[in-house]
Image (spheres, rainbow, N blue to C red):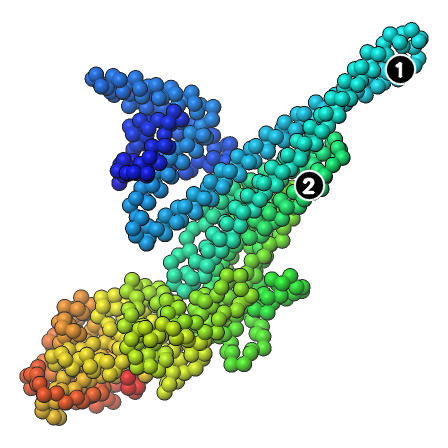
Amino acid sequence: MAVWIQAQQLQGDALHQMQSLYGQHFPIEVRHYLSQWIEGQLWDAVDLENPQEEFKAKRLLDGLIQELQNKAEHQVGEDGFLLKIKLGHYANQLKSTYDRCPLELVRCIKHILYTEQRLVREATNSASPLGAMMDSMSQKYQQINQAFEELRMFTQDTENDLRKLQHNQEYFIIQYQESLRIQAQLSSLASLPPADRQLREPALLSKRATVEAWLTREANTLQKYRLDLAEKHQKTLQLLRKQQTLILDDELIQWKRRQQLAGNGGPPEGGLDILQSWCEKLAETIWQNRQQIRRAEHLRQQLPIPGPIEDLLNELNSTITDIISALVTSTFIIEKQPPQVLKTQTKFAATVRLLVGGKLNVHMNPPQVKATIISEQQAKALLKNENTRNESSGEILNNNCVMEYHQTTGTLSAHFRNMSLKRIKRSDRRGAESVTEEKFTILFESQFSIGGNELVFQVKTLSLPVVVIVHGSQDNNATATVLWDNAFAEPGRVPFLVPDKVLWPQLCEAINIKYKAEVQSNRGLSEENLVFLAQKAFSSSSNNPEDYRSMTMTWSQFNRESLPGRNFTFWQWFDGVMELTKKHLKPHWNDGAILGFVNKQQAQDMLMSKPNGTFLLRFSDSEIGGITIAWVAENPNKAGERMVWNLMPYTTKDFTIRSLADRISDLNHLLFLYPDRPKDEVFSKYYTPPLSKAVDGYVKPQIKQVVPDFATANSDPTGINQTYMDHGASPAPVSHQQTYGIYPPIHIYNFDLDDTMDVARHVEELLRRPVETQWGGQQSS
């Protein structure tokens, strides 16, 4: 909906605020009759601080006037006649007001639109948390923009004062020269006859006295002007420092934190365009004030007047240099981080960017950036400004890159596209620390000058921590180190300290974000899932989420110590679940078909209250990256007894042969997905279509799965030759008085495993797929 339509629905104080935006400078009637045209223009594309953008503003002003005139011409009738006169008057009024300063029109309309949007947003979203967050962000942006407007006015004010000071000083020098000329005339009177000297001397003495009195007064005035100007510059620099702190220490640090959380799968950190525009405004304002201070210093040198101004100017110059140094060094950032799990001999990329590079014309002499890998200890020494003697902890190929200026985006950046870590030098490890817990970082450094070599900067920035691996088998544990660091690192920390233990809810948030990102699903971990994980992590049987809220988990519990009775850690088990789901189970997880985080006892309790043939899917407790099917059925060996059966877990290598949906389709004794959904309703859209009939006299074989104790005689509806794979099931007997009839009498197919393997190898030759030990022994779940 158009902003103006919504703005007209405002009430109370919000309506009064909206009405106060308008007046002779911009009539509300113009906003009303040209609302669609006004909201369709690119007002934000005009940089108000750049005089060269005036032509864009002039074009918008001309367009506005033309639209008003067109609107006026189309008015008819008695009422239309009055509106035609009024709109024509407004067109002439706006042209007269803004023709010489079209940028002010753009400033005015941007302010109006921004305020209207804020008022509408506040009225619409005041009751929602998201609305409150957006409103908070809007207020912060408004605060920043208002501060820039104040800085612009302060800088313009000091510019005017400086010009006035220069003008007065130039006039003072002229009058001083006049006093020297009078003094010379008085000196020349000595050569004249006494009568002539007496005739001319009084007038010259009087004139000299007048000029010297004026010079004395004016010298004091000039000194006051200089001191007043210095005080105004002090005020400007205070506001500049405050604004810079807000942008660099709050907004930029928050962006970096979002970038770090995005490494765990959090929301994207967002673009840098707004931050760059703020930093460029800072750079421009700082540079303007620096030039003003230098001009004031030049005026002081041109006409020295005793007083405190020299010390004040030196202090101002030092302060402004510190401010611009902080801006330049802080805005040399890593836009695209290198991979945090870094494998040797593998190509990787990264991008660094200087947010103020374009505004300070750094690209006129493009700087070169160098990348080096350094250890955690070397990073600590670097931040303490200790001499590291250009040490590195490895060798990176293609580690030099020239920064390029992109005219269309106004960005100055260096794109490292083909870096490769050739070798790594590891340090002595501490205690139980493994190689996948050792952290490194990529150091990017450069040197460049601004203002015609007036200021030279050496800039450095460190990447997020990276863990170096040499084999893919180390990826799992390296990812755990990165996850823990990204989730729990605090801003401004000593590299790369993280807490050894965290609250369980904090860890839940981190692994939930990671899970959704890896599986690429909006379905995250439910409270029941997190309780299951807590039971696994803490060897607890409590089902109450509140029991875990104050519990802490240490790094050792997370990924050093094996789970009780297992040979893998909590993280290794969880990562296996993520990998399996990501590669083979994503659609079923998104559909809600996989309960997953359920133990064997819970599955049994859930299924025993359901009809025979009801099944559920849960992740294996005993095997990394395994999923099993649990179902309820009659005990064939004992009449009247029902039991829950658990199929040996499937893993990735099973699903490379036959998908989960097809395996469920193969098992005719599975009827309803827990709690009561017919299995075909859930899984049929994922079934592999039946193979075609014989071609050229050949029949294509098809692999199908059977569970020997549950195979039925009608398990080949297509009539096509099939190869069956045995898959063991383990029973969990439970006596139950109620009985369920579910199948007609069943016929059991008994296959010899060696024969099955021979057939499988024959199928393999046809399908050209690796077989090896696909049907080797599996652990029980």
* In the foreground, 156 or 689: 156
Residue marked by disc 2: 312
- Whole-angstrom CA distance, mark 2 to mark 1, is 42 Å
Q: Residue at x 28, y 86 (%)?
A: 780
Residue 182 percent across, percent down from the top left:
82, 17
Q: Quadrant of residue 781?
A: bottom left
| Mark 2 crowdedness (10 Å alpha carbons): few <14, some 14-19, many ≥20 | some
Q: Is residue 649 above or below residue 130?
A: below
| Residue drawn at 55 percent across, 78 percent down | 430
Say whether disc 2 or disc 1 marks the residue closer to the N-terminus.
1
Secondary structure at badge 2 equals: helix
Residue 167 image offset from top left, x and y in percent: 66, 25
Would residue 574 appear left or right of 185 to someone viewing this image? left
| In the depicted structure, whether residue 44 falls above or below residue 476 | above
Q: Using the image, determine if residue 726 lies above or below residue 209.
A: below
Q: Depth check: 416 or 702 in front?
A: 416
Q: To which residue does mark 1 refer? A: 188
- Can residue 720 be seen here? no
Residue pictured at 20% horizontal, 68% vertical: 686
Q: What is the three-letter code of the residue carrying label 2?
A: Leu
Tell me the residue at 70%/32% (across/down). 223
Q: Residues within 10 Å of mark 1 (few under 14, many from 20)?
A: few
Instruction: Using the rendered image of the protein, determine whether residue 53 is visible from the camera's viewpoint.
Output: yes
The label nearer to you, 2 versus 1, is: 2
